Amino acid sequence: MPWTLALFAGAAFAQAPADTEAPKPAPLTKLQYSSAIGAYQAYTDQQVQSWREANDRVGQIGGWRAYAKEIKTGEPASAKDVAPGSDPHAGHHGGDKP
């Protein structure tokens, strides 16, 4: 029993009176909410085209290298950016030797 009284007495002295410290006001902050899916665009079907036309278009643009450049620069690939002599396979299929 004496140990219990000593424990409670020590706990009572350890607490500071509540009126000695004035509570500090919370800093003023402006909260903003931005939805993670706010700019979501739903899937839409693409126009169906001939696979030959699609392959020809890729060939005109410059093949996979054009798509790699598109990802690196962020600008869409187009046929006007391709130099006329940039086809690495020119001469392979016609029997001509480079």
Image (cartoon, helix red, strand yellow):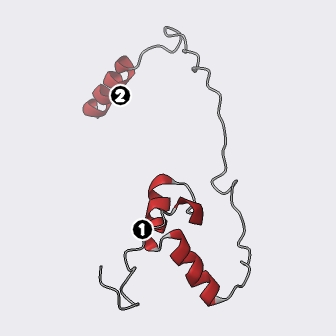
Q: Which mark is residue 29?
A: none
Q: Which secondary structure, mark 2?
A: helix
| In the displayed structure image, the side of residue 95 where residue 28 appears, left or right | right
Query: What crowding class fits label 1: few (fewer than 14 Cα within 10 Å), some (14-19), or many (20 or more)?
Result: few
**Label 2 with label 1: CB-CB less than 8 Å:** no
Where residue 24 appears, as percent x and y from the top left, is 54, 15
> What's the residue type where badge 2 is placed?
Phe
Mark found first going from the N terminus, 2 or 1: 2
Q: How many marks?
A: 2
* Residue 95, picture quadrant: bottom left
Q: Position of residue 63 (x, y in %)?
A: 47, 74
Q: Please tell me whether residue 23 is drawn above or below residue 30 in the rendered image.
A: above
Quadrant for the N terminus, please: top left
At horizontal 55% and vertical 73% (from top left) the residue drawn is 60
Q: Which residue is mark 1?
A: 86
Mark 2: give few (<14), some (14-19) or many (20+) Cα within 10 Å.
few
Q: Is residue 16 left or right of residue 46?
A: left
Q: Quadrant of residue 90?
A: bottom left
**Residue type, label 1:** Ser
Horizontal and vertical percent position of residue 73: 48, 53
- Label 1 residue SS: loop
| Residue in the foreground of this view, choosing between 93 and 56 | 93
Report which residue position mark 2 lands on.
8
Of residues 39 and 12, the one drawn nearer to the viewer in this rendering? 39
Compared across the picture, whether 53 is left or right of 60 comes to right
Query: Does the image show residue 37?
Result: yes
Query: Which residue does the image show at 35% across and 28% down from the upper left?
Result: 8
